[in-house]
Image (cartoon, grey):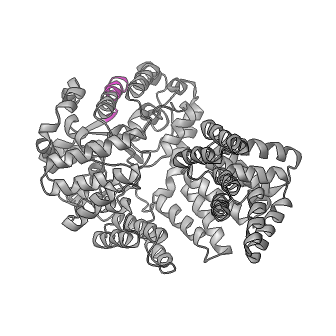
Amino acid sequence: MSAARDNILRAALGLRKESRCGEALRLLERIAQAHPQFSRLYQERALCLLRLGDGQGAIAALHEALRLNPALPACWDMLAQLLHRTGDQGGAAQARQRAEKLAQLPREIVMANALHADGDHAPAAAILRDYLARDEGNLGAAHLLARVLMEGGQDDAEAERILRALVSRDGAFLEARFDLSVLLLRRQDPEEARLHAEVLLRHQPTNRNWRKQYAAASVALGDHDAVIDLYAELLAEVPAEGAEPAELHLFRGNALKTVGRLDEAVAAYRAALAARPGYAVAWFSLANLKTVRFTPGDIAQMEQLHGAQDTTDMDRVYLDFALAKAAEDARDFARAWRHFERGNDLRRRASSYCPRTAQERAAAIAKAQGPALFAKRQGWGHRDRAPIFVVGLPRSGSTLVEQILASHPAVEGTHELTTLGRIAAELFGQDPACGLPGAPEALATITRAQATQLGERYMAETRVHRRLGRPFFIDKMPNNFWHVGLIHTILPHATIIDVRREPLSCALANLRQLFGTSNQEFTYGVDHIAGHIRAYLAMMEHWDAALPGRVLRIHYEDLVTNLEGEVSRLLAHCDLPFDPACLAFHRTERSVRTPSAEQVRQPLNRAGIERVDDYAPHLSPLRAALGDALTSTGS
């Protein structure tokens, strides 16, 4: 809830009561600029306009209030009276019916619904908890509380408990089951999320929301082929233009890209733009394929959209990264750098990442998880040898190493699995400033039995991603470098590979890449990326000292210059026989989700290394920020 917003609303109400409605309306406009979805400002606007004698304006304001928030009884009452006066008896009757329906509900439920619609989740949850203490059997109130908790980000665990209880009590409570599926997917449990979506579809096979949820869970499971036709079916049921078809074309394009059907992916992204010409993320998605060359007409459209007054900051970020790609293709690196700088600056403003905190977390992990801790835990953990963890910085070459390994007949590639991160968060908590382990000393408190159980849990939870039944599989979550000590403790026979790239080249590659909305937030500024690289290097230096020989280091530049020698070393470390297919990794057909998807479908080249020369005139601040990290490449 915004205290400033509500204070302005109260001030406007006071002005109206003093018949200073013009001043009140100007205050309300201030709220509208900052909180355009706040329904009660439109209710107050209607009251001001009504006092000024503008009945039609008041009716329009009430319609907007009720569009945003249908749980406003006073608005329905007022609308019914105004429509009656204008002779719209049908509209007045409908408004009265809505008001009467709300009047039949418990007052607390109506209040909570209204607060929820305005984003005031905490007071809505408090009202609902108090009400349920008196009427614990009210399933609707319990479901509303779960939704409030989900949407407010207050307590997903409590929301999940409520939703599971509702589904257990009434298996046909489909809305609760749907919300449970959504929550499970958000909590990174796509397997159960899809099971619930399947139940929903057995009840209502044509329900669009159920089908979209099934598709989202399938994508999270890596089952992209299954959704391509499903998105096409959903598209066949809607008009050709609008926000929904644009989004569906985008999702279909993402799935086509992941399975390597590039021409169809391009067509899908173009269809998204045809459905919604201002769809900035579709322009970025075309650029992110790395293979599309924009036409002068494309560039003109993007520049016009970037300059439009109503374009959001995030859309401008998408457009800057797409325009940078167009400038690179024209070899206008000065213009490309300006776009990267502008896009990164906008993106960084929305980030809470703190590089100093990351470096402090690295030091805390090193202090808490030293050689003595691991010496006392020799022989602990689950004995399975199947996992191969590929760690490192993003854009370091980790996707290339994954593709090489996944070309071996004994190894299955999955994707950036989140299981270990969830286990680490449960054990150590998370520092809110950077999401890194908050209490790494907790590793010393787990018992031998718990270490085994955690290893078994990891294997069980990742099984759903192993579709081919091969002896080994890859977990390519790069950020797992923070958790090498945990991996060693619970999975002592797992393989750990650190993929490293020359720091300046790696930093530049990150500054040139736009990641997902909450991923890799350290990549949007020179000081941020330099600080994170320092933390990464310090962390890996610590693991080398605390667990000598435990991590194999592969340098991207060595792969480029000596592919066969490095692949032989990599396979030997994984205790795998040499297989020539690993040298022809670009021919391997598998889904690849990362920004490097198209690069690993091409033979190796020096393009990534040579980008530093292209941008040399602009890299002095980055060189200075990296300092001695430029020479800390490790062995």
Image quadrant where residue 492 sits: top left
Instruction: Check if residue 81 falls in the magenta segment.
Output: no
> From the viewer's perspective, is 626 left or right of 195?
left
Query: Image quadrant for the N terminus?
Result: top right
Quarter of the image with the C terminus is: top left
Would residue 175 appear left or right of 104 to someone viewing this image?
left
Residue 68 picture location, percent across and down: 63, 58
Q: Which residues are magenta?
A: 538-551
Residue at (30, 50) in percent of width and height? 399
- Residue 443 image position (x, y, % from top left): 52, 27
In the picture as drawn, the residue positioned furthest to the right comes out as: 134
Examine the rendered structure and indicate whether residue 451 appears above or below residue 254.
Answer: above
Residue 523 location (% of width, % of height): 33, 40
Residue at x 42% of width, y 34% of height:
353
Residue 622 is at least partly visible in this image = yes
User: Residue 394, can we see it?
Assistant: no
Q: Indicate whether residue 541 is drawn in magenta.
A: yes
Tally of numbered tags: 0
When the figure is inspected, residue 265 is found, relative to residue 381, above or below; the finding is below
Q: Is residue 518 left or right of residue 577?
A: right
Q: Which residue is nearer to you in this view: 495 or 345? A: 345
Q: Position of residue 590 (x, y in %)?
A: 34, 63
Who's the residue at 36% across and 63% down the image? Answer: 282
**Front-lying residue, 342 or 358:** 342
Most common SS among magenta residues: helix
Front position in the image: 192 or 244: 244
Q: Quadrant of residue 248?
A: bottom left
Residue depicted at 65% across the width and 69% down the height: 200
The front one of 55 and 43 is: 55
